[in-house]
Amino acid sequence: MFEIVVHQLAFHALDMAGLINKINRSTISPLPIVYSSTLKQIIKSMLRKHPEHRPTTADWLRHPHLQPFVLRSRNTPSVFILVLLISCNSLEKNLTNLAVARTRGTKMKGLQTVWRKFIRLKKMEMYRQETAN
C-alpha cells in the first residue's frame, strides 16, 4: 500500500545491512501531506514490525473508513468475496514471510509470488468493477 501511494519503496537503503536496520527499526519515509491522516494511520498499521500487531483482513473490512466500500459490495457474489478474502489472507502471509526473510538476511525468493498474487487481486478487482457496470 505504501509503495502504491508514495511510488517508492517503504524501506530503502544502499546495502542489505542498512535495509535490515530500517526494517527492524520500522523506519519509513514520511507520507506526502496530501493524504488524509486516516490513510496514513492505515498504512503505518500495515507496516508494523510484528505481524501480530498488524490488522487482519477482517479488521480492514470492519474499519469505519472502508465501510462505505464494503456496503457497496453487498451485491457482489459471495463466492467472489470469499475468493478475495482467501487471496488477501494468503497475500498477508506471503508479505509476512517476506519481511521475516528480509530480516534474516535470506534471499527474497518469495517476492515474485507476492507480486503475482497482488496482480491477481487487482485483476479480480477490475473484473468485479466491469461486471458491476
Image: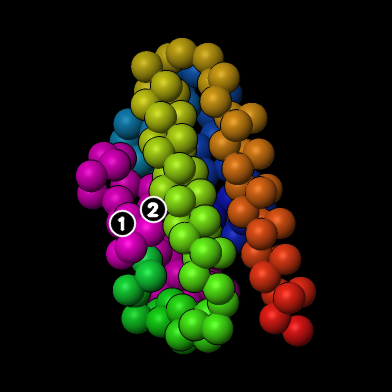
Q: Are marks 1 and 2 in contact (CB under 8 Å)?
A: yes
115 is higher (above) or lower (below) than 76: above
Taking the magenta stretch, the answer to whether it contains residue 42 is yes
75 is higher (above) or lower (below) than 28: below
Q: Position of residue 38 (x, y in %)?
A: 40, 74
Label 2 packing within 10 angstroms: few (<14), some (14-19), many (20+): some
Mark 2 highlights which residue? 46
Tag nearer the camera, 1 or 2: 1
- Name the secondary structure under disc 2: helix
Q: Position of residue 3 (x, y in %)?
A: 59, 50
Mark 1 highlights which residue? 55
Q: Earlier in the sequence, mark 1 or mark 2?
A: 2
Q: Position of residue 125 (x, y in %)?
A: 65, 64
Outermost residue on the top side: it is 106
Q: Position of residue 97 (x, y in %)?
A: 40, 29
What is the span of residues highlighted in magenta in the rendered image? 30-59
Q: Nearer the viewer, residue 117 or 101?
A: 117
Q: Residue at x 32, y 47 (%)?
A: 48
